Amino acid sequence: MGVKAQVGYQISLLNTATGEPRANETVTVSISLSNNANEVFYSETKSATTNDFGVLSLSIGNADTFKDVDLTKMPFFIEVTANGVMVGKSQILSVPVAEVAKQLAPIKIEEIIGVWEKYDDYSNYYYSFNKDGSVVETIVTNNNSRSSSGTFFIEGNYVFIIHEDKGTYFCNSFLIKNRKLYGTSGISSIYTKQ
């Protein structure tokens, strides 16, 4: 898995005065991976040696490089400097398949169990998911709290919550992505796990 999560990168280093390849030369390389908002989500510095033709081959990252990356901020970019000189910045044309697949895989109940919170300017909202399939929704406004209980189930990457309020049943649905719950019922709501 660690190998599949890495990014392969090759570049030719040339002598700027002669245009000749910088063969068998060891350089200090700094690498950063960023998203389309120019936010760096991974960086590293390493020593690497060019081959007989001046080509520098790098394996960038590890098993956790793309673990928490926000796939909604694609495309991703790679920036490389060698001995402090910018070599280039280019778009990564594909994300390691294994890491994307993990984010799209069906959610397990263990990933849901716990307390999830959303805050706005007026209130705090909580969902407490339990192993037995029960859920408690709590809304705290101006130090007053109101709670209702219900049940939940998971279907693929979605969590469905069914609860009762004064004899009426309601169903809320959420998409689980990047360790957050995104409301799918037309209401802008994003819950994060506490």
Image: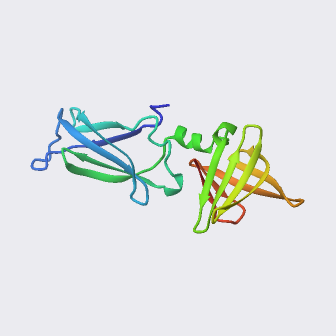
Q: Position of residue 32 (x, y in %)?
A: 34, 48
Q: Position of residue 6 (x, y in %)?
A: 42, 37
Question: Which residue lies at the image location 74% right of the left edge and 50% below the top edge?
Answer: 136
Residue with the most extreme left position: 17
Question: Which residue lies at the image location 50% right of the left edge and 45% below the top edge?
Answer: 68
Residue with the most extreme bottom position: 121
Residue 139 found in image quarter = bottom right
Q: Position of residue 8 (x, y in %)?
A: 38, 39
Of 76 and 8, the residue lying toward us: 76
Q: Is residue 102 above or below residue 116?
A: above
Residue 44 found in image quarter = top left
Of 90 and 20, the residue lying toward us: 90
Question: Which residue lies at the image location 81% right of the left edge and 54% below the top edge?
Answer: 163
How was this image coloured? rainbow
Question: Which residue lies at the image location 46% right of the left edge and 55% below the top edge?
Answer: 75
Question: In the visual, does 76 lie left or right of 140?
Answer: left
Q: Position of residue 23 (x, y in %)?
A: 17, 35
Residue with the most extreme right position: 167
Q: Is residue 26 above or below residue 90?
A: above
Of 77 and 179, the residue lying toward us: 179
Of 7 and 191, the residue lying toward us: 191
Question: In the visual, does 91 lie left or right of 147?
Answer: left
Residue 117 found in image quarter = bottom right
